[in-house]
Amino acid sequence: MSYYGLLKGLDLNSVSINELKEIQLSNGVFEQVNRVSLTLDGSPNSISQENSDPVYVPNTALTKEFYDYLLKVYENVLENSLIGFFYMYEEDIQGHDEKETKNIAHSYYREIAQLTIKDKFDVIRIKRSSDGYPIVSRAKKTELFNMRQEVLQENLATQNPIHLNHFLIGDASYFNDSLIAKSSILYEILQFEASRRILTIFNEQFYFETEDSSSIDESKSETIPETVEKPIKKKKRLPLISDKEVTTFLIDTVFIKQAEKNKT
């Protein structure tokens, strides 16, 4: 089932918010689920129908289709971002041997992942050795990016409903380059996807992270999501562009300038 243009012909200005919600529910765009509010004062939580409230969550198939649609719409923006970044990267590795080049690439790999995920979350897995001692491992950066992508897909459909509404009525003209500067969630998604593609390219070239033979499902019971403090002092790295410049080249010099150009 395709959700793009599902509500084609609907005049968004002629329906109220409640009417639009009913239309979306009847077409399977959103689903009503009951969620229990948990108390944090130590008192028992009653898990019952009476103690739950109805909430509306977007269909997961919809969120993925909408997200993928925007990636196609703004493919040229993402490509220009990568060209700008790797142009600087090629300048940075000029004259270095293979080992030095890999070290520079790895510094970028870690730096961009940290800038993108920031302190949103981290995941550690605790397993037991044959002697019962804990063995701690951190989730790979590629795995964290996959998790973050799923969150962004839902945020895209919920944080700014007007975007979703124009997608549902099939209004392609709404999604122009000038929208990037106006929409924080779209801005964040394009920044994230540009960073994810850079990491993918580096990983395919240098094999910084490989797929784990054990499945994620097998370790779910031993997975503990948490924000990880990193008090360890960073080693001095090779002279790369600064954090601010990385972000600038990924977004500001490409996305914003292109958006401003389309305004004039």
Image: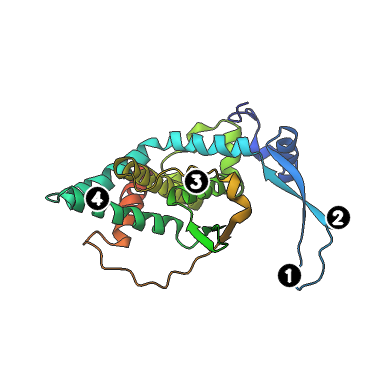
Q: Is residue 194 visible?
A: yes
Q: Amino acid at mark 3?
A: Asn
Mark 3 or mark 4, whichever is nearer to me = 4
Number of numbered discs visible in the structure rendering: 4
Residue visible at 44% across and 34% down in the picture: 73
Mark 4 or mark 1, whichever is nearer to me = 4
Q: Amino acid at mark 4?
A: Lys
Crowd tier of the residue under label 1, counting other residues whose Cα lies within 10 Å: few below 14, some 14–19, many 20 or above:
few
In the rendered structure, find residue 40 and report the number of the disc placed on it.
1
Q: Amino acid at mark 2?
A: Ser
Q: CA distance from mark 3 to mark 4?
A: 24 Å
Residue 39 position, x and y percent, is 76, 67
Q: Which residue is mark 4?
A: 102
Crowd tier of the residue under label 3, counting other residues whose Cα lies within 10 Å: few below 14, some 14–19, many 20 or above:
few
Camera-side residue of 254 and 138: 138
Q: Which residue is mark 2?
A: 48
